[in-house]
């Protein structure tokens, strides 16, 4: 049984990385390895991706914490968005701390903007330097795997699909109320929420009865990013705030159609969770969304940054309860067969085994 230190953001943070880490800690991985978790979240004002004094201090403090917690263990497993540069340097320093503690190091990349950010030669050189302390780099989406393999070499990079704990999400019975579009995610323009609000207005103009429910809170980049979203949503959407993981099943139960209109993603867990709950999904064609959502079968995949395309895809689902039911059932089956937490845990465990084979 290998001794693993998971490093990443947990509560009070919301978002993909905290949800993914919670899933790993509750998965079969915990019976195969000795897992411990170092939570590097903070309760100060978010300043993600910026070279502020507070971020520098937190990084230095967290690197020391990693070094102390990792001594005597086998693997340090760092979870990061990896881009922009400040985030990359932070992941590198946490990796260095793990190596200094005598551990093998994995950097698990969750940020869907990596392939666009790595568009210049100096950034590619920076990534090669920053990821030198890491023994393996895991990408959660295919474009990320290709991009990182081209920069770091295919032998260093692995693709591990995201997965969700199927039993945590049980489809609820259909209702006869006004259908609800549900969004779960951070309240920021880069998540396409403004596009979704505009799509809702278009649907109202077409006479399509519905409600728009937004579940989410302050994004990593700080409170200023959610100001335009809240302003646009006033009078159009129900703003429900963020929810802790144990309340997410109840949140999905309130929806009839799930929509993720992001400008970029990797493999969004919210889409997989919604499908596990039996909701049809309308999402933009970013990251590996098209691998998760079977267009025309479990929902619809549309171009990013297009409110009319969102409205066109949402309209038939809002008008036809039987279409919602049929696509929701198909989505549940797709997650069960391809994107379960069991499959993800097995793939992560295989990477651990690669690095610990032969260690005393």
Image (cartoon, helix red, strand yellow):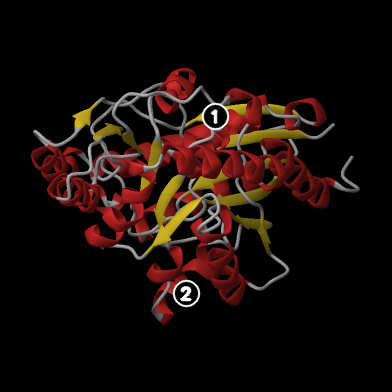
**Residue, x 21% and y 29% (percent of image)?**
239
Say left or right for 12 vs 345. left
Task: Identify the secondary structure beneath mark 1.
Answer: strand
Q: Point out residue 79 in the picture as x, y percentages from the top left corner.
A: 53, 44
| Residue 254 picture quarter | top left
Residue named by callout 1:
38
In space, the residues marked 2 and 1 are separated at their CA atoms by 29 Å
**Residue, x 27% and y 52% (percent of image)?**
192
Residue named by callout 2:
124
**Residue, x 42% and y 81% (percent of image)?**
121
Depth check, front residue: 56 or 157: 157
Q: Point out residue 116 in the picture as x, y percentages from the top left corner.
A: 39, 70
Say left or right for 226 vs 169. left
Up the image or down, 149 lies above or below 51; here it is below
Quadrant of the drawing holding the C terminus: top right
Depth check, front residue: 103 or 322: 322
Task: Identify the secondary structure beneath mark 2.
Answer: helix
Quadrant of the drawing holding the N terminus: top right
């Amino acid at each position: 049984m290998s001794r693993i230190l998971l490093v990443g953001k947990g509560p009070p943070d919301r978002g993909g990385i905290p949800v993914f880490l919670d899933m790993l800690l509750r998965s079969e991985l915990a019976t195969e390895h000795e897992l411990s978790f170092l939570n590097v979240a903070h309760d100060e004002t978010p300043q993600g991706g910026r070279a502020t004094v507070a971020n520098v201090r937190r990084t230095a403090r967290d690197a020391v914490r990693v070094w102390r917690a990792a001594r005597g263990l086998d693997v340090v497993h760092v979870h990061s968005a990896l881009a922009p540069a400040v985030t990359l340097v932070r992941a590198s320093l946490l990796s260095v701390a793990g190596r200094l503690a005598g551990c093998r190091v994995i950097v698990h990349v969750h940020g869907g903007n990596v392939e666009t950010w790595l568009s210049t030669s100096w950034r590619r050189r920076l990534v090669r330097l920053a990821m030198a302390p890491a023994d393996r780099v895991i990408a959660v989406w295919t474009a990320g795997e290709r991009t990182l393999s081209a920069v770091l070499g295919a032998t260093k990079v692995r693709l591990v699909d995201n997965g969700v704990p199927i039993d945590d999400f049980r489809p609820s019975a259909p209702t006869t109320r006004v259908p609800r579009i549900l969004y779960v995610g951070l309240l920021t323009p880069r998540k396409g929420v403004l596009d979704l609000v505009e799509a809702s207005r278009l649907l109202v103009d077409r006479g399509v009865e519905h409600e728009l429910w937004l579940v989410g809170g302050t994004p990593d980049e700080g409170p200023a990013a959610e100001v335009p979203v809240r302003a646009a949503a006033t009078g159009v959407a129900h703003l429900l705030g963020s929810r802790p993981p144990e309340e997410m099943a109840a949140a999905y139960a309130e929806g009839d159609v799930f929509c993720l209109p992001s400008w970029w993603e990797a493999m969004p867990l919210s889409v997989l969770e919604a499908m596990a709950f039996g909701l049809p999904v309308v999402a933009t064609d970013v990251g590996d969304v098209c691998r998760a959502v079977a267009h025309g079968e479990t929902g619809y995949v549309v171009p990013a940054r297009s409110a009319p395309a969102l409205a066109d895809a949402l309209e038939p689902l809002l008008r036809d309860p039987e279409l919602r039911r049929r696509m929701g059932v198909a989505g549940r089956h797709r997650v069960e067969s391809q994107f379960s937490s069991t499959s993800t845990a097995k793939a992560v465990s295989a990477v651990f085994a690669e690095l610990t084979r032969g260690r005393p």
